[in-house]
Image: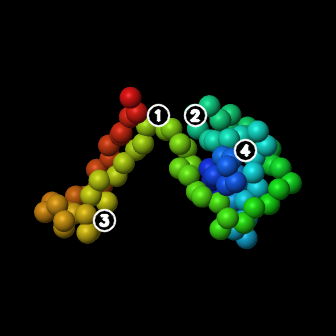
Amino acid sequence: MRFASCAAGGRRFAALVEDDDTLRPLRDVAELGRETPAEVLADPPLTDERIPLAEVRLLPVVPHPGKVICLGLNYAAHVAEGLFEVPEYPTMFPKFSW
């Protein structure tokens, strides 16, 4: 399953992205994040509404993450632009919100 956080018509909502590029809003879920129960993602409470993906503004899927895990030097152009050596493994590092 793919999820999106969206804005359209003055409202914000989380939605399930269907294969035909339509969105099915989740009932009573304005955004996804650490407070979203796992049950909501496993069995999303969908509305009957269908919205074309092209008609919404996409927002970050998780608007306020507690942390982001980053990969550094994970593609050749990045290594070349920084004049680094190609590592045997990509460098992983966290970014935490404050």
Residue neighbourhood size for the residue with mark 3, other residues' Cα within 10 Å, grouped as few (<14), some (14–19), many (≥20): few
Q: Tell whether label 2 touches label 1 (CB within 8 Å).
A: yes
Identify the element where label 3 is drawn: loop
Residue neighbourhood size for the residue with mark 4, other residues' Cα within 10 Å, grouped as few (<14), some (14–19), many (≥20): few
Residue 93, relative to residue 53: is it above or below?
A: above
Task: Say whether residue 51 is left or right of residue 69.
Answer: right
Give the labeled residue for mark 1: 66
Give the labeled residue for mark 4: 42
- Estimate the x, y position of residue 4 in percent, counting from the top left: 63, 53
Give the labeled residue for mark 3: 75
Task: Say whether residue 13 is left or right of residue 96.
Answer: right
Of residue 80 and residue 63, the one placed in the foreground of this image is: 63
Residue 6 visible in this rendered orientation of the protein: yes
Q: Nearer the viewer, mark 3 or mark 1?
A: 1
- Estimate the x, y position of residue 36 in percent, counting from the top left: 65, 35
Instruction: Please report the residue visible at 53 percent of the width from the left and 42 percent of the height from the top.
Output: 63
Identify the element where label 4 is drawn: helix
Give the labeled residue for mark 2: 34
Identify the element where label 1 is drawn: loop
